[in-house]
Structure formats: C-alpha cells, structure tokens
Image: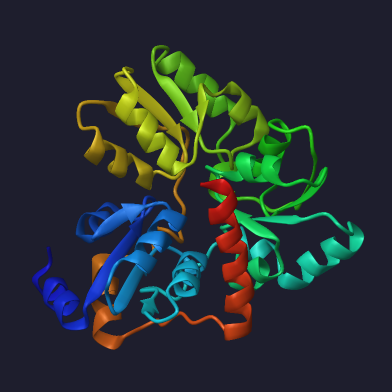
Amino acid sequence: MNTSLKRLKEQNDALILAHNYQCDEVQDVADNVGDSFELSKIASEVNCSVIVFCGVDFMAENAAILSPQKNVLLPVRQATCPMSQMITSADVRQLKEQHPGAPVVCYVNTSAAVKAESTVCCTSANAVKIVNTLEADRIIFIPDWNLGQYLASKTDKEIISWKGYCPTHRGITLGDVLMKRHEAPDCEIIVHPECRPEVVAAADYVYGTGGMIRHAKMSSAPHIAIGTEVGMLHRLKTICPDKEFSALGETVCPNMKRTHVADVVRALERKEYQITVPEGVCIKAKHALDMMLEMGT
C-alpha cells in the first residue's frame, strides 16, 4: 500500500471502501471491495471514525445514512450517478399521487431524498423477493426501467416503472451478446439486470455484481463473459485467477473511473468531501433501507 495512505489511514482511524467498478489501483488499496449496499453495511458494522467511500455519490450517502456517527468522505465530488439524477423526490410524490396506495420500491441507486419518499429499498439481488413479498398487486418501481422490466418478468404483479436507466448498462447490445457467442461459443454469459431486456433474455445468467462473484466461484466454465461495468473484470480475476473473463462491449462508467489513489490520499489529508444527510431525510431514508433488510435478506 502507498506509504502516505497507510499513515493517513492510521492517523484518521479510517476505512477505505471501493465499489467493484472502481479503477484497479483503487480496488487494490481498499480494505473492502464490493457492491454499494454490501459496502454500506460493512461501514455500519466496522468500528472506525472515518469512511472513505470510493464510488459515486449515492453510495457515500447510503453509508452516511447507516453510519450517521461516522465521517463519510467521497474523494471526488464530481463522481455522481447519472441514473440517480434521473428522478427527484418531487417525481416520487407525483407518482404516489397518480397511483394511490401503490407502494414505492426504490433501487438503492438513488439519492437519500428519493429513498425518503419510498416505501422500501432494494438491490438488484433482492428486488424480486422484495416485490413478491409486498402484499400490493401494483408496485411503483424507481428509477431503472430495465430492472423494472426484469422484475415484471418475475412476478404476476403490475410494475409501474420510471424511465430511468444506467447509460453504461444500456450501452450493452444484443449484438454484443451475439458477437461473443460467435467468438467464444463455449463461454458463459452473465449480465446485470440493468441491461436492456433483449440482452437479459439472450444471456445465460442474470446477476448483480455480488451474484456474478458467487457464480464465478462455483462455475466450471473456463471463460465467463460479463455484461456490466469493466471494473468488475479486475475483481473477478483477483478472486478467480484460474478462469478467463471478458466484457461485453465497451462498458466503462466515466464517473466510476474518476477516483484514483491520489484522490483517496487527498481526501484523508483535507477531510473532503464530507457527505452528510439532513436528519429528517436520513430518518425516512433509513426506514426504507431497514425495511429492505427485514424483507429481502
């Protein structure tokens, strides 16, 4: 580990968390690497004073909601999530007015203000279970339309989906899947449920990043192609060095790639950028997250 970074970690009693999509160098210096909610849970459980969250803004907010007594730092202020910015708290209130009585299932890839207006949160891994556990026949799902379509295929309930999307996952096409089938006919293809419906339908398996890791560990396939952000390749190769992994298409999230080790060092030196959530918003958002933990684990 970078000597300066090690010293700063010790001085600040800090924990460094990195999302699976972060640059290789950031993953390599992190104390924990994982998906956004997995890391937020770790942040709430580990005894430390400072959390440096190497990811995008909503992830650091999740950690701040679950660990209000800790100082949560986002190393790069511009590391934002386009999908989370596609819906506001006012949009959610309008949806509830348009569909009275329908619970709002909110993907964790959203702002704290949006979570505060929601009934329950979900991840890509537990979304199907959350939706099927709710007693209502009509569900408002926000903000990812593609994930909403995937949910609709797994339930008899009516899913009212917002038209948000992840630009990186939407960039993966059916042509990318067909090309991979042609180039490597024996490989397994795993895609994220944020991908287009036709991509999901053509894949062998559909998992969030945590599920991809679990599957890769158990799979006997020597080559696995993944339909998600390219940073996942480094994570998979680190865990399963005996297997070959490749990506479907050009799957780089520019915001996930904004953070470098130098930014982590600077964040600890300057105590920036501190992420805080207003108390009223925090209480309501935490309720939606706690509901998820009750229902979906």
Can you say whether 79 is above or below 123 in the image?
A: below
Instruction: Relative to 98, say whether 265 is above or below.
Output: below
Measured from the top left, where is residue 167 in percent x and y?
58, 50
The one of 94 and 170 positioned closer to us in this rendering:
94
Corner quadrant of residue 115 = bottom right
Q: How is the image coloured?
A: rainbow
Q: Quadrant of the N terminus?
A: bottom left
Where residue 21 appears, x then y in whole percent? Answer: 39, 51
Choose top left, top right, bottom left or bottom right for residue 106: bottom right
Q: Viewed as shown, does residue 155 lie left or right of 49?
A: right
Residue at 51 percent across and 47 percent down: it is 297
Compared to residue 66, the image places residue 33 above or below, namely above
- Residue positioned most to the left: 3
Location of residue 186 in the rendering, given as x and y in whole percent from the top left corner:
39, 12
Q: Please say whether residue 82 is visible from this viewpoint.
A: no
Q: Position of residue 151 (x, y in %)?
A: 68, 38
104 vs 9, nearest the viewer: 104
* Count of marks overlaid on the render: 0
Q: Residue furthest bottom?
A: 270
- Where residue 43 sits, quadrant-wise, is bottom left
Is residue 190 in sight in this rendering?
yes
Horizontally, residue 78 falls left or right of residue 101, namely left
- Left or right of residue 94: residue 209: left
Is 57 situated above or below 164? below
Residue name at image x 57 percent, y 26 percent: 175
Decide if residue 295 is on the left or right side of residue 258.
right
> Which residue is depicted at the point 43% across and 37% down?
211
